[in-house]
Amino acid sequence: MRIGKRWAGGVALMATAALTLAACGGGSTTDAAASGDTAATGLGGEINAGVAYETTDYSSITSSALAVGSNLQVLEGLYQLDMSTYEAFPALASGDPVAVSDTVYEITLRDGAKFSDGKEVTTEDVLSSYGRTTAEGSIYGQFFDFVKSVTAKDDKTITVELNYPFANVAARFADMKVVPTAMNDDELKAHPIGTGPYKYETITPTEITAVPNEFYNGAHPATVKTLRWHVLKDDSARLAAALDGTTDVMEAVPASATEQLKAAGWTVDSVPGYGNPFLMFNTMKAPFNDAKVRQAIHKAIDKKKLIEVGMEGEAVEATSFLPESNPAYKKTATQLSYDLEGAKALLAEAGVSGLTINLVTTDHPWVTNLVPQIKSDLEALGLTVNHSPMASADLYSNVTDVDEPTYDIVLAPGDPSVFGADPGIILSWWNGDNVWTQKRTFWQKSDPDTFQAFQALFNEALQLDGDAAKQKWGEAQDLLAEQAVLYPLFHKNMLTAYNGEKLDGFKSIAATGIQLIDVKVK
């Protein structure tokens, strides 16, 4: 997307929120490669992180919150995002993309770059990685619709040809992680090899460890002997691990635990984010194929109360698909704030009464904590609500991603800002031509006219700049609110806690996950 200088400048005004992409290049943190191999020997210390999510897929194209976060330390793209600012800096590239024309860029690889198995990185690895990233079925492919081709000019230079001028080439290519051509998909899911400062040592369902990559020669070498992620989905288990000294960093801190952590000497950061709980409707199933019914269900839920009680105030009600901090945000024409009488009127207009719904949710504690009030609010609308919680992997593999799904409504968390924060990424993640609209919501099939209308607005916005782009993004947000096929209830503040007496250089981020690059043990 062509955001341009005006929007990029908005980031400087909101750097502490870390909510939007900034221009790449410049500054000491964006220097290219440092010379020589990482001195893996002599490093001391261990950083232990308590994480809230689990996965079995650590591949370069995973959508897992845990794996995307841990891969930050292990896999590199040509560019990388500093997730505390969303600033793109050269990683496997030796510098910023060089513009040959408005639609052609050249990117040179870092001299001497090697994978953690000691094999040199080649342009073939870059091209095959681009192929994996954009292959049919990859949800990352939508991030690269602006790209016409990626080719090798020589053994060190990649040529990127665009379909149209696009301002954020470096930031988008941060989402293409470079992995060895020889590795197959199953190997990558289980134990990927990368070029980052760390390499995976062990990966189990409950713990992941990474150690320094002795072949790394970039600008951000390993700073500790071991990184260890403890998979602790239960909030109380993560809190206990923090308080007893097992962990040094805790993600997804419940608001109720902040004072306890502070009393123990920890720092707790609250960063406005994009993460949200969303309602997703099966639009192939009546009456959820009716936008009025979907709007009514949203309007029946008291989000302000939900935030106050379920999130202890650490969230902001969604008044658009994008949070207010995003420069492209527009308060939508259709508002889905709490209005019980309005919700009843919409149901009456749709001719719906005596409805029983099956609400399927993930089993994340903060999500299930929302269910009692949501159930009560929907019962006040006259609905009967049955609730089924389950693990995310089971929900998607057994409930939504099946040949003929029978679910009614899903309540689940999501946070595509792990891939970047420009509106093109956030809006397309759930609403692009991908698995979400093809299988999960069935928007493409149930209402192709409105789906294509959104795609047209989206594609126009991508090719515009400044106020014209913001206007078009606003129209796209209006349509998403009106249809409410998949829509957030609120946007969470990301609460992360860390032991500042032990860690030096830790920065909390707005996205799900923990960034440990350059963090040291005191």
Image: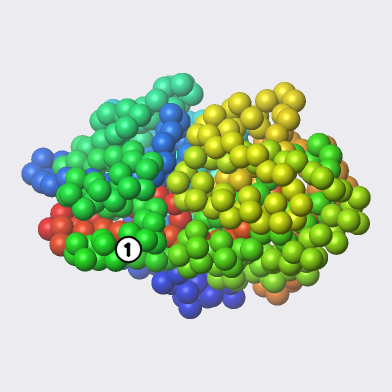
> Percent position (x, y) of residue 60?
46, 35
Other residues around mark 1 within 10 Å, as few (<14) / some (14–19) / many (≥20): many
- The amino acid type of the residue labelled 1 equals Thr
Residue at image point 26% right, 61% down: 261
| Point 27% across, 29% down: residue | 202
The N terminus: image quadrant = bottom right
Q: Is residue 289 visible?
A: no
Total label count? Answer: 1
Task: Write down the residue under mark 1.
Answer: 258
Q: Work out which residue is located at the far left of the displayed protein and give it.
A: 42
100 in relation to 446, above or below: below
Q: Is residue 470 left or right of residue 265?
A: right
Residue at 50% across / 63% down in the picture? 309
Quarter holding the C terminus? bottom left
Q: Left of 513 or right of it: where is 230? A: left
Q: Position of residue 150 (x, y in %)?
A: 58, 40
Q: Is residue 154 left or right of residue 501?
A: right
Q: Position of residue 274 (x, y in %)?
A: 53, 59
Q: Is residue 38 above or below residue 89?
A: above
